[in-house]
Image (spheres, rainbow, N blue to C red):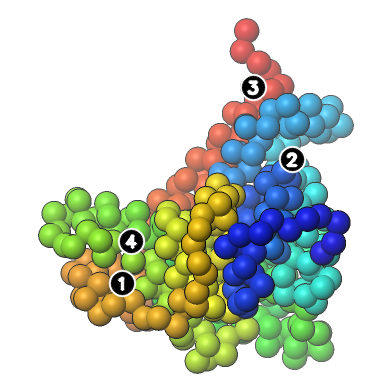
Amino acid sequence: MGGFRYTEGPLLDATRRFDTVLWNDSSDLDELSLSLTFGGVGATCNPAIAYTTLSTRRDLWNPRIRTIADEHPTWGESRIAWQAIKDMSVEAAALLRPAFEASGGRDGRLSMQTDPRLMRDAAALADQAEEFHRLADNIVVKIPATKTGLEAIEEATARGVSINVTVSFSVPQAVAAAEAIERGLETRMRAGHDVSHMGPVVTIMVGRLDDWLKAVVARDRIFIDHSALDWAGIATVKKTYGIFQERRFTPRLLVAAFRNPLQWAEFQGGDLVVSPPFAWQTLINDSDYVVEERMSVPVPDHVIDQLRRIPDFVRAYDEDGMTIDEFESFGPSARTLRQFLEADNDLDVLVRDILLPAQ
């Protein structure tokens, strides 16, 4: 990965010392280019991230969206917006190609999310995942960890699509998703295909679990040591990581939706992906933090005891805490799916305002 100067600091130190790898939680090209100097080897996109990029970089994207519309005069707002997302993702994937080639497909991937409006249709999700996979061979496709999503994950994996499981906050979701990926890989291998260069990951959105539990504690007036609440996502990831290692699952864990630097520091030393937003990367890298191995350090028992007073933490932390049928209605899942659907609406309005500005 030559061609640029590395930025010394805790992030680069961690990527050099440990198997823990850094992905940027944005496909903005300027941010990604700088993340690469921190040792980053991947990036992600979803409707909310795409909307943020398109709306904050109007100087770049307004004329490009007008060009897409001019080239496709019959397209509606949504199709134009999604073409912009595809263009953004392909360009970000090109920046990551050196890491992709150097790692044999394990890293150097751009995560591109399926349209949340398809979340009730497994066949449509799998078809779109295959479409995105064909845009660039180092694209990994996000599908949510819902009952319908798990069907699509298995099918898309069997077609050769590397999956990044998203809308995932719990041990039962992550384990079920990994098992779906393994079934898809086995089907593909039985059909005579090589799967050695596929790079699936299973995400746990640590901060969104913490956000939900803090809201539940306030709503249900649960008296708890509030310092424990910043450990819920961390505890869930560490438990899931142990299960993944013990069962030798093919996909790696990916940690996203950061809310504090602890959610980076506590995973160093593990064979997993950490994907903080660019702002968190600069905060960490500008600090005097001394990187140390923390993945093997268990969350203190008294923290787990406090968190177990919250029923939804038990649902997230215990492997049998939820059934597959319950995944979609789990609080952080419903919240996140709604946010992604709202971001789709925001993208439509953004395109409308570009093409038909208010008079």
| Foreground of the two, 171 or 152 | 171
The residue shown at (40%, 81%) is 297
Tell me which amino acid carries mark 2.
Ala
Query: How many angstroms separate mark 2 from mark 1 (CA)?
Result: 38 Å
Counting from the top left corner in percent of width and height, residue 121 is at 58, 60
Q: Earlier in the sequence, mark 1 or mark 4?
A: 4
Q: Quadrant of residue 30?
A: top right
The residue identified by callout 3 is 353
Residue 85 in view, yes or no: no
Given this view, does label 1 or label 4 mark the residue nearer the observer?
4
Query: How many angstroms separate mark 2 from mark 4 (CA)?
Result: 36 Å
The residue identified by callout 1 is 315
Tell me which amino acid carries mark 3.
Asp
Q: Earlier in the sequence, mark 2 or mark 1?
A: 2
Indicate which disc residue 230 carries: 4
Q: Earlier in the sequence, mark 3 or mark 1?
A: 1
Q: Identify the image quadrant of the N terminus.
A: bottom right
Query: How many angstroms separate mark 2 from mark 3 (CA)?
Result: 15 Å
Query: How many angstroms separate mark 3 from mark 1 (CA)?
Result: 43 Å
Tell me which amino acid carries mark 1.
Arg
Tell me which amino acid carries mark 4.
Asp
In the image, residue 208 above or below residue 245: above
